[in-house]
Image (cartoon, coloured by chain):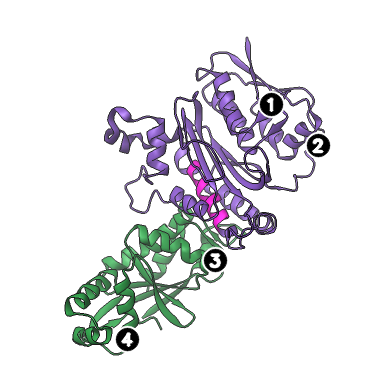
Chain colours: A green, B purple
Amino acid sequence: MIETIAVARMLREAVTTPYLNLVTRPTGVAVRGRIESVLATSEWETAMLDFSDVVLLDLSCADEVVAKLVRMAQERLGRLVALRGLDEHLWESIHAVLEHQQLAVAVLADGSITLLGCVPADVHHLFATLESATPLAAAALSQRLDWGDARTAEALDAALALGVCRRAMGGFVRVPLA
Amino acid sequence: MSRIVDVPAQFDEQGLDQLAQSIGVWPPADRLFFDARGVQWAAPYALIGLLTAAQAILEAGGEKPLLAVPAADDVRSYWGRIAFFQHAGDLFEFHGKLPKARGAQPADTLLEITPVRATEDVHQVVGRIQEGASRILAGELGLEAKATMGFAMALSEACQNIVEHAGTGGWVAVQAYNYRRRLGRRVAVIAVSDSGIGFRRSLEPTQAKRYGDRWRDGTALEAALIQGVSRFRDPGRGQGLAGIKRYLQRWQGKISVRSGTARIAIVPAWDDDVPLVEDLSFFPGAQLQVTIPAQDAGTT
C-alpha cells in the first residue's frame, strides 16, 4: 500500500514555529522520526512524502528527511520512498543531496512520474518506457528502446539498484505511485 | 591597565583584519580599549566581528573590554539601529554618548544583528528574512524571485555552522547596501560570526592526519569550502557550504570565510580579492560573509 505523509504536518508537530520552513538538521531529524513512527505502524510498500505547503527546504533537512528515508527504504527490499508537492526550490535542494549520495527518488508531478537525483540518462529513458501495470521483458524493452541487450541489462541493473523499478512476472515494471 | 585598539575608519572585511592585527597576541593580556570614535563606515560583518572579539575575550576569562563609541552621529545612529549597542551592552563597557533609543531598523536591513545559539534561532532568522529578502533581492537587486529561496537556504546553512561546529554562540546580520568601493552596485550581504573553535580545530580529529605538517587554518578552510569535507563520517554531511557555493555561482556572488589566521574566498569576476590569504593576525572563531550583487541587465 501507499502511505501518504504530509510533511508540513509533521513539521508543525515537530517544531513550534509559525513558519513552514524545513530547516536545520535537528529539525530534519525530528521530522524524520515522526515519519518513521507513522511508517512503523503501517503496512506500507511506498511512502509518499507530500511536500505541499513546505515553503523552504535546506540541504541539511533534505538530507535528513529525504536521503536518509530513501536509503532506509533501499535497505528494506521492496520498499520505496516517493515524493510529490515539490516546487522548483525544493526540487533543487533534494536533487543536490541525492546526487551527492548516488541516490534517486521517484517524483509525482503534474500527473506524471519522473526521477530525481543521481539518475543516469539510460535509466531515465528506461523508466519512461516501463509501465507500472504491465511487466515488460528485457528483450521487449531492448526492442522498444532500440538498444542492445547489454545496454538494457545495465540500465535495468541500475534502475533496480536505485529502487525505481521491480521484477514482476518474468519482466519489469516501474514502481507504481498511484 | 588598558591598551588602546583603534577601530579602522572603514570598518569592513579588511578593517576587521586590521583590528585583529591591532589586538595582537591572543588572548590579549591587557584590558582592551576599542576606540571606534573615528569610524566613518561599518559593515555588518565587521560589527559582528567586534562583538565576537569581546565575546571571545570574556569567554577566555579576560576583563570586559572598553568601547569608545563612534563620534559621528550618523554612524552611531546606524550602530544603534542595527542593534549593535543592544547586544554589546553585555560585552563592553561603553565610553561616549549612546543613541537615546534604538530607533527604526534601517530600511535596507533585512535582519539586524541577531544572536544565534540554537536551532530555534535559525528558524527565527530564516523566517524573519523571507519577506524582506524577496523585496530586496527581486525588487532592488534584480534577481529572479526564485533567488529568495536560495538566499534563505544559504542563510540557514551559514547559521547552522555556528550551532553545529562553533561550540558557542554567534551572530548574524543581513543587509543590502551600495558597495561603491569595489563594485559600484548594490549588494545583499549575509554576515555570520562566532567565537568558537574555528574550522581547524573542528576538522582536526578527522582531517589533520591526512595533511600532516601542512595542517593549518588555510588547509582546514580549503578542505571545508573547496572539498566539502565534514568532521562527520555521514555521507550526507558537508553539503551546506557546497549548497551556498552553487547558489552564489548562479548569481555571481562571493563567499569568504575567515578562521584563525586564514581567509578563503570564492572570488567572482567583479572582485579582485585573492582566493586564500594565510598568516593573518589571529582572530577567534569563524567569520563568513556572503555577497550577492545586483544583477546587470541580461546577466540573469
**Pointer 2 chain:** B
Residue B65 lies left or right of residue A111; in this view the side is right
The residue that label 1 is drawn on is B9
Kindly identify the amino acid type of the residue bearing the numbered disc 2: Ala
Instruction: Give the number of the disc on residue B101.
Output: 2
Of the residues tagged 1 and 4, which is closer to the observer? 1
* Number of residues whose C-alpha sits closer than 10 Å to that of mark 1, classed few (under 14), some (14–19) or many (20 or more): some
**Pointer 3 chain:** A
Kindly identify the amino acid type of the residue bearing the numbered disc 3: Val
Q: Give how far apart the Cα atoms at labels 3 and 2 are.
A: 38 Å
Assess whether residue B281 is covered by the magenta stretch. Answer: no
Q: Give how far apart the Cα atoms at labels 1 and 4 are.
A: 69 Å
The residue tagged with tag 2: helix, strand or loop?
A: loop
Question: Range of the magenta residues?
Answer: B150-162
The residue that label 3 is drawn on is A54
* Number of residues whose C-alpha sits closer than 10 Å to that of mark 4, classed few (under 14), some (14–19) or many (20 or more): some
Q: Give how far apart the Cα atoms at labels 3 and 1 are.
A: 44 Å
